[in-house]
Amino acid sequence: MGSDAPLMVSVSGCRGIVGESLTPEVAARYAGAFGGWLCERAGGAATVVLGRDGRAGGRIVRDAAAAGLAAAGCEVIDLGVAMTPTVGVMTDQHAADGGMVITASHNPQQWNGLKCIVRERGLRSATASASAPAADVAAQIKDRFREGRIGLAPWDRLRPVETDTTAVTVHTGKVLRAIGDVAAIARRGFRVVLDSVNCSGAIGGAALLDALGCDVVHLGDRDTGLFPHPPEPIKEHLGSLCAAVKQHGAAVGFAQDPDADRLAIVDERGEFIGEEYTLALAAMEILHRRAARSPGATMHGVGEPAMLVANLSTSRMIDDVVSRLAGAGSKVFRAAVGEANVVEVMKREGATFGGEGNGGVIWQDVTYIRDSLSAMALVLSLMQRDGRKISQIVRDIPAYAIEKRKVDLKPGMSAAPALEAIAKAYARERLDRQDGVRVDFDAKRAWLHVRASNTEPIMRLIAEAPTPEEARAVLDKAGKVIA
């Protein structure tokens, strides 16, 4: 085992490099820790839905995780290759105690991991309730794993792993019911290029777009689990998608990450419009739907306030969208980075929609997990409702520039001193300390967020301002503070 290989255990689960820091033993122990916690909470056998993102090598990690869960006394339902949001939907469908996804999300090919999903106690209806565990629950699972408290059931309580092949149908059906007028979208006959990076979103993404009447050109639709390009859906990695949209005269291009909980968009010109726009566009459609259901309302304001949630690293575009399309008293609540934190605030504030600026849309009508299928359906519904090209809709959203940088953290190195330096240097500005340090420069319509990553051994510096030059200047100054 490579002693220097990172193993990240956090609110986002456990991630490591396969064959080095993430071995079958580690996977079984972490799954056993989660399974033991679920069984203790249930007071007996707990039911867990299991899926994997389809990346090469994931089957071995899945088998080890299934063994760890079963050894802890869990009833395991295996979906095979499944999107992270699909595991959430099926956790509700089976009224299971929890779910587990074998995924490293957007991390490079050599990474894999285990992500936990927890269903709220006492909820046994069709209401979406499964989500990534809150920080306190994740901390308990982390402690159990570190301390070796995995829980082992006696031989007569061990159960065979079951399978369920209906997951794609159930998930896409739920999205279609939530979107409503499927025929209206189908009449437009949108040509869509979809890049599923040869992973879990391929089958579900194609099935949804087909049901919405789209003419689909599918890239990365093989089941090899080998990424045709780096898997994070950012501009530098999506040249083939941009070219295909232009080549095929498509109305829009969509890019999923390996576990299909994020969505990036390319407009009809073959131009990458930025991950941040996914949430803003989906929010526009949510607010339009809200206005359409409100008697006497207009698209420029409904009587009842709208409550949406975004994390601290998400663009202020969503604030502008809410200000323009929702009524007085509407608010965008900010949460710490991580969908579990966003969902926690959504539930607390009664918001049915939220997400993150990395292309992650959370729609309570489908699942309390970031979902690329929900995002695609909402964007297509917006395009149908508006009637204009996606580039024209985007031009109506006030534009900002986001600049991002990373600082590597060596093993054992803490981000705390850098965070304190930032807080001290900007003490006179508006600060938010719930996740690292966010500094809002209200007069400049700009902000800075510095935090330690939950998934990689790095510190992230993100700045947004009206122009790239202003955003880079914010980062340059922050870099000098923490140097």
Image (tube, rainbow, N blue to C red):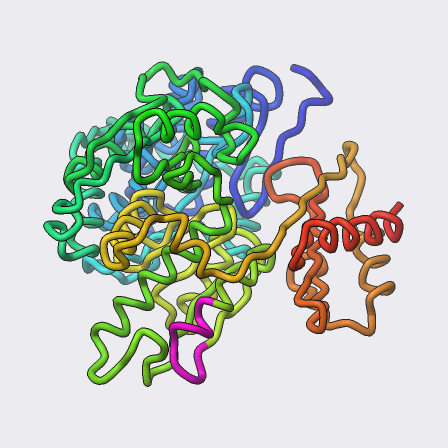
Left/right of residue 303 with respect to residue 93 in the rendered view: right
Q: Decide if residue 26 is in sight here.
A: yes
Query: Residue 410 versus residue 187: which sits nearer the camera?
Result: 187
The residue that appears at 25% across and 34% down in the rendered structure is 204
Left/right of residue 381 with respect to residue 265 in the rendered view: left
**Residue 456 position (above or below residue 180):** above
Q: Position of residue 26 (x, y in %)?
A: 54, 26
Image quarter for residue 173?
top left
Query: Residue 339 versus residue 215: which sits nearer the camera?
Result: 215
**Residue 294 position (above or below residue 467):** below
User: The N terminus is located in which quarter?
Assistant: top right
Q: Position of residue 89 (x, y in %)?
A: 27, 46
Count the numbered circles shown.
Answer: 0
Q: Decide if residue 45 is in sight here.
A: no
Q: Position of residue 398 (x, y in %)?
A: 52, 62
The residue that appears at 55% across and 48% down in the rendered structure is 11
The residue that appears at 73% across and 22% down in the rendered structure is 4
- Is 328 in the magenta? yes
Left/right of residue 276 with respect to residue 68 in the rendered view: right
User: The C terminus is located in which quarter?
Assistant: top right
- Is 316 in the magenta? no
The residue that appears at 41% across and 48% down in the rendered structure is 391
**Residue 158 position (above or below residue 143):** above
**Magenta span:** 321-330
Image quarter for residue 190?
top left
